[in-house]
Amino acid sequence: MTATNTATARAPFRIGMLIFPGMTSLDFAGPLDVFARMPDTQVHVLAKTLEPVVTDIGLRELPSMRMDDAPPLDLLFVGGGPGVNMLMEDAQTIDFLSERAPQAQWITSVCTGALVLGAAGLLRGYKAATHWAAMEVLRHFGAEPVAQRVVIDRNRITGGGVTAGIDFALTIAARLHGDLRAQGMQLAMEYAPAPPFDTGSPATAPADLVARVRAAVAPSTEARMAAARRIARRHGWTDGICD
């Protein structure tokens, strides 16, 4: 077989990125920018319908395909955002993830997208990251929350909140294409974080600031906790702890 025929025969690595109303734009945009630049890769932006999806800041994202029409996927991705609260109990989405996960090589999320994976039963017995304000919700799904930017446990790769999506995606690029390729992508993106404040984590932010932000997101966190308890009871996941 010639080199040309070999290249033609090689199937692309297919990524399915789920988008939904109320998602956080950067949870999706950061990883997409990396994934779309990886060689031999097809990225499918999936939603329940082909209608534009309105994000939490009013940006309109266009799906490329209905999730029910998606081809076999090598990597599943779910981002987070306020819309996660409803998505955790959306039967069509949960069924899609549950059905596609066994065939995927990698099952991944950024931010509170991990709660959707958890609701689908895909993090039971796994270590996982999510947004710092949602860490305890993971326990109801039998997952072990880990306060790191990126957590890899077997074929589950989960990222922390929002901006961790770039770290997450570069980690995946390195896994699939080697460190040198991923390093080149990071350089091309000029990804050299130098934030103006050291308040990007509860571990470094002043206690009063953490308390203020935690109070602001408390209603959403409590709604997620309530949904997680309902889901855990429905599946018999006693106290959200693995058997």
Image (spheres, grey):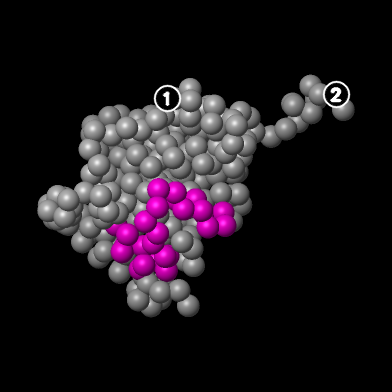
Q: Is residue 149 left or right of residue 179?
A: left
Camera-nearest residue between 41 and 184: 184
Q: Which residue is mark 2?
A: 2
Q: State yes or no: residue 7 in magenta.
A: no
**Secondary-structure class at tag 2:** loop
- Three-letter amino acid code of the residue under disc 2: Thr
Camera-nearest residue between 107 and 149: 149
Q: Position of residue 170 (x, y in %)?
A: 50, 37
Residue 178 visible in the displayed image = yes
Q: Quadrant of residue 42?
A: top right
Q: Residue at x 51, y 27 (%)?
A: 185
Q: Quadrant of residue 28?
A: top left
Q: Residues within 10 Å of mark 1 (few under 14, many from 20)?
A: few
Q: Position of residue 239 (x, y in %)?
A: 35, 76
Q: Which mark is residue 40?
A: none
Most extreme residue toward the right, as rendered?
Answer: 1
Q: State yes or no: residue 151 in magenta.
A: yes
Q: Which residue is mark 1?
A: 190
* In the rendered image, the vertical position of residue 62 relative to residue 108, given as above or below: above
* In the rendered image, the vertical position of residue 206 relative to residue 60, given as above or below: below
Question: Looking at the image, is mark 2 or mark 1 earlier in the sequence?
Answer: 2
Q: Position of residue 65 (x, y in %)?
A: 47, 34
Q: CA distance from mark 2 to mark 1?
A: 38 Å
* In the rendered image, the vertical position of residue 45 relative to residue 86, given as above or below: above
* In the rendered image, the vertical position of residue 4 relative to residue 121, given as above or below: above
Camera-nearest residue between 228 and 95: 228
Q: What is the total number of numbered labels drawn onto the structure image? A: 2
**What are the residue bounds of the magenta stretch?**
134-158
- Front: mark 2 or 1: 1
Q: Residue at x 38, y 42 (%)?
A: 164
Residue 46 visible in the displayed image = no
Q: Position of residue 177 (x, y in %)?
A: 62, 35
